[in-house]
Image: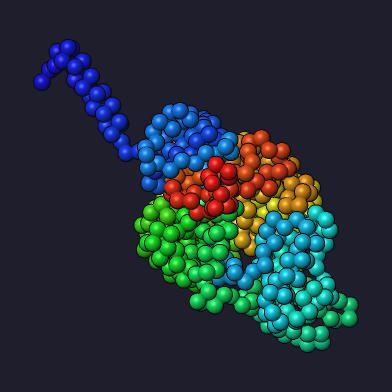
C-alpha cells in the first residue's frame, strides 16, 4: 500500500505521540543518585551529574534536573554532595576462589606500608589466635613496600613477636619467613635432612647449618609451605568467603576474572546467587592443561567437550586457561626462558584443539622467548583455525615488547596486564637491573593500540587493591612509594583499562565497564575525586559506597543519612 505524503506525515506524528506516552508511563526509577561527578568512562569519557537506576540496570545518566524529574514518589534519592562516581572496578585475573579457603585465617599485608604497623598486626593476631595457633599469610606483599623500614623478617624477630605461635609470612611467590615454631612444625631442624616435599636448596641455612627461617626460590619453593598451612574448617568456608568478598567490595571490586574456579567455593557462590546475595561477579578461566606429554591426549578430549558461556552476568565460564602445557608455564621470577621444540609441539597440539573447538584462550605468558615462541605457535594455529573472534589473550606480560604487541594485534589478540612490580618492584630490580623500569611497559602497550586491561594476579603473586594498581600505572611507584617503573600512563587510560576494557576482556562489554543507560548498575562512590586528587594519593582513594546490580553491597557508614556520606 502506498501512502500519500500527508498520510505518511500523520502516521509519523502518531508514532511520536505513542513514544511520548510510553515514555511518560515508564515506571519511575528505584534510585536516583544526583549532585555528583559521574565519571561515566563511556567512549567519550563523559562527565555527568546524576544517574537513575531501575532494578539492576542504569536507565538514565545526565544533568541533575533531567534525572531528578524522572523520580517518582517511591524513588530513593541519594545526594552525592559532589562526590565522584566511577564504574565498578574489574580485575581481569585474580585467583579469588582459592583465597576463600584461607582468607579468614590469613593476616593480610596488602596495602600495609609500615613495617611497624605490620609488626603490631602480627602481635595482635597472635594474641587473638591464642597459643599454638598458626599466624600466616600467603603472599600479597613484599618487605620493600614498608616505607618506614624496608627490611625482611628474621626468625629471631618473629620468635620475639609471637613466641607462642607458629608464624609463616609469604612474600609474593618469592620467599617465606618462618619462626622457630613454624620450622619445628614442618620438621625443618638443624643437622637433620630437609623434608622431602621442599625444593632442594630452598631452605636457607646459616654457616653453622642452622635454618634461618627463610624458604626461598620462586613459586615451587614457596608452595610446600602454603600446602602445609591449615585452611579454614569446612563449616567456616562460607564465612571466610563472605569476608573475602566484603574486602573486595570495600576495595572497589565488583567483577573478577578467576583462574581456577574451585568447585567447593563455586557452590557457595551459586547458592548466594540463587538468594540474590552474590556481591561480586565472577568469570571463570578454567580447563585441563596437560602436565606432561602423556597427558596431552586426555586434555585434547576434554577440550573437545568443553562448553563455555552457559552462565549469566553473575557467574560464567569464559576462557580456557591459564595454562596450556605446564612445562611451558614461566616461573614468576625467572630471568629468561628457553622453550624446547618438543614442548612447543605439545603446546601447539593443545592450542590447535582449543581453536578448533572455538574456545577463547587466556594464557600465562611472561618471558620474552616464551612470548615469541607462543606467538609462533598461535600464528601456525591461526592459519588452520582462525582465532580472530575468539579473544585469545596473553596474560601478565610484564616483559612484552613492541614487536610482540604488533604480532598480537595482527592476530586479533588481547593483552591482560598484571603489574607484579606493584609489590615486587624491588625484587625485579635486583633480577633485571634497570630493565625492570620497563616492566610492564605500560606506555608501549597503551601506544600500540592493542585492546588491553589491568588486573593484579592476586591474591598471592600480587596484592589485590585496585586503587594501588591504578596508582602504580599513573606514578610508576610500587606500594610504599619507591619509583620502580618509568612507563607511566594517564589516569584516564588507567581507569579505562580497569573498567571498560576489562568488561571486554570478560565478555561483558554490553553489561559492564561504564555508567551508561542499559548497563548493569555496578558503580562506586569515592571519598575523593580520582581525576583530580594528587597522583600519590590515588592509592588512598576509598569507596564510600559500592553497588552491584543496583544493590548497595558496601557502605562505609550505613547508619549515616545518605547526604552526609
Ligand atoms: Zn599466571
Residue farthest left in this picture: 1
The total number of labels drawn is 0
311 and 561: which one is in front? 561
The image shows residue 512, relative to residue 262, as above or below, that is: above
Q: Is residue 518 left or right of residue 144?
A: left
- The x, y position of residue 164, in whole percent, is 75, 81
21 and 464: which one is in front? 21
Q: Is residue 36 left or right of residue 318?
A: right
155 and 341: which one is in front? 155
Q: Quadrant of residue 172?
A: bottom right
Residue drawn at the location 14% of the way across and 13% of the way down: 4
Residue farthest bottom in this picture: 192
Q: Is residue 486 visible?
A: yes
Residue drawn at the location 58% of the way across and 75% of the way down: 231
Residue farthest right in this picture: 207
Residue drawn at the location 73% of the way across and 66% of the way down: 121
Q: Is residue 95 left or right of residue 181?
A: left
Q: Is residue 508 visible?
A: no
- The x, y position of residue 214, in whole percent, is 78, 72
Residue drawn at the location 77% of the way across and 61% of the way down: 117
* Snapshot colouring: rainbow
- The x, y position of residue 138, in whole percent, is 66, 67
Q: Quadrant of the C terminus?
A: top right
- The x, y position of residue 249, in whole percent, is 55, 54
Q: Quadrant of residue 533?
A: top right
Q: Quadrant of the N terminus?
A: top left
Amino acid at each position: 500500500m502506498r501512502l500519500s505524503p500527508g498520510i505518511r506525515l500523520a502516521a509519523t506524528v502518531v508514532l511520536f505521540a505513542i513514544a511520548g506516552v510510553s515514555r511518560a508511563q515508564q515506571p519511575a526509577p528505584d534510585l536516583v543518585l544526583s549532585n555528583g561527578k559521574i565519571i561515566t568512562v563511556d567512549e567519550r569519557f563523559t562527565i555527568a551529574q546524576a544517574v537513575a537506576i531501575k532494578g539492576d540496570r542504569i536507565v538514565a545518566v545526565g544533568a541533575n534536573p533531567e534525572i531528578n524529574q524522572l523520580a517518582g514518589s517511591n524513588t530513593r534519592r541519594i545526594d552525592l554532595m559532589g562526590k565522584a562516581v566511577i564504574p565498578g572496578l574489574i580485575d581481569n585475573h585474580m585467583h579469588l576462589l582459592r583465597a576463600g579457603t584461607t582468607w579468614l585465617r590469613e593476616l593480610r599485608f596488602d596495602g600495609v606500608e609500615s613495617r611497624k604497623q605490620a609488626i603490631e598486626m602480627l602481635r595482635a593476631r597472635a594474641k587473638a589466635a591464642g597459643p599454638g595457633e598458626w599466624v600466616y599469610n600467603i603472599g600479597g606483599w613484599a618487605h620493600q613496600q614498608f616505607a618506614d623500614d624496608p627490611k625482611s623478617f628474621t626468625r629471631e624477630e618473629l620468635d620475639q613477636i609471637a613466641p607462642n605461635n607458629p608464624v609463616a609470612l609469604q612474600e609474593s611467590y618469592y620467599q617465606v619467613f618462618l619462626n622457630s615454631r613454624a620450622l619445628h612444625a614442618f620438621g625443618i631442624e638443624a643437622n637433620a635432612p630437609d623434608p622431602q616435599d621442599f625444593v632442594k636448596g630452598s631452605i636457607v641455612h646459616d654457616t653453622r647449618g642452622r635454618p634461618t627461617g627463610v624458604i626461598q626460590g620462586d613459586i615451587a619453593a614457596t608452595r610446600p609451605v602454603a600446602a602445609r598451612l591449615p585452611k579454614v574448617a569446612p563449616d567456616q568456608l562460607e564465612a571466610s568467603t563472605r569476608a573475602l568478598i566484603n574486602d573486595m567490595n570495600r576495595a572497589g571490586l565488583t567483577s573478577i576474572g578467576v583462574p581456577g574456579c574451585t568447585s567447593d567455593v563455586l557452590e557457595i557462590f551459586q547458592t548466594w546467587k540463587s538468594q540474590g546475595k552474590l556481591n561480586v561477579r565472577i568469570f571463570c578461566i578454567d580447563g585441563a592443561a596437560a602436565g606432561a606429554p602423556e597427558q596431552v591426549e586426555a586434555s585434547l578430549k576434554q577440550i573437545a567437550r568443553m562448553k563455555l558461556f552457559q552462565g549469566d552476568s553473575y557467574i560464567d565460564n569464559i576462557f580456557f586457561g591459564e595454562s596450556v602445557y605446564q612445562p611451558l608455564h614461566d616461573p614468576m621470577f625467572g630471568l629468561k626462558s628457553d622453550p624446547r621444540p618438543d614442548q612447543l609441539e605439545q603446546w601447539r597440539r593443545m592450542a590447535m584443539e582449543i581453536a578448533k573447538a572455538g574456545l577463547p584462550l587466556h594464557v600465562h605468558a611472561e618471558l620474552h622467548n616464551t612470548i615469541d615462541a607462543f606467538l609462533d605457535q598461535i600464528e601456525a594455529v591461526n592459519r588452520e583455525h582462525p582465532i580472530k573472534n575468539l579473544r585469545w589473550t596473553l596474560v601478565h606480560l610484564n616483559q612484552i615488547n613492541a614487536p610482540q604487541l604488533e604480532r598480537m594485534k595482527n592476530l586479533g589478540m588481547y593483552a591482560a596486564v598484571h603489574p607484579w612490580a606493584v609489590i615486587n618492584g624491588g625484587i625485579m630490580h635486583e633480577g633485571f637491573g634497570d630493565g625492570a623500569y620497563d616492566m610492564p611497559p605500560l606506555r608501549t602497550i597503551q601506544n600500540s593500540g592493542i585492546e588491553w586491561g589491568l588486573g593484579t594476579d592476586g591474591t598471592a603473586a600480587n596484592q589485590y587493591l585496585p586503587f594501588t594498581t591504578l596508582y602504580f600505572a599513573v606514578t610508576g611507584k610500587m606500594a610504599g612509594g619507591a619509583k620502580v617503573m618509568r612507563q607511566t600512563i594517564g589516569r584516564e587510560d588507567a581507569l579505562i583499562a580497569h573498567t571498560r576494557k576489562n568488561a571486554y576482556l570478560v565478555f561483558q562489554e554490553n553489561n559492564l565497564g561504564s555508567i551508561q543507560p542499559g548497563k548493569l548498575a555496578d558503580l562506586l562512590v569515592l571519598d575523593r575525586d580520582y581525576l583530580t586528587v594528587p597522583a600519590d594519593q590515588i592509592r588512598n582513594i576509598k569507596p564510600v559506597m559500592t553497588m552491584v546490580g543496583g544493590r548497595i553491597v558496601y557502605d562505609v557508614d550505613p547508619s549515616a543519612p545518605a547526604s552526609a556520606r
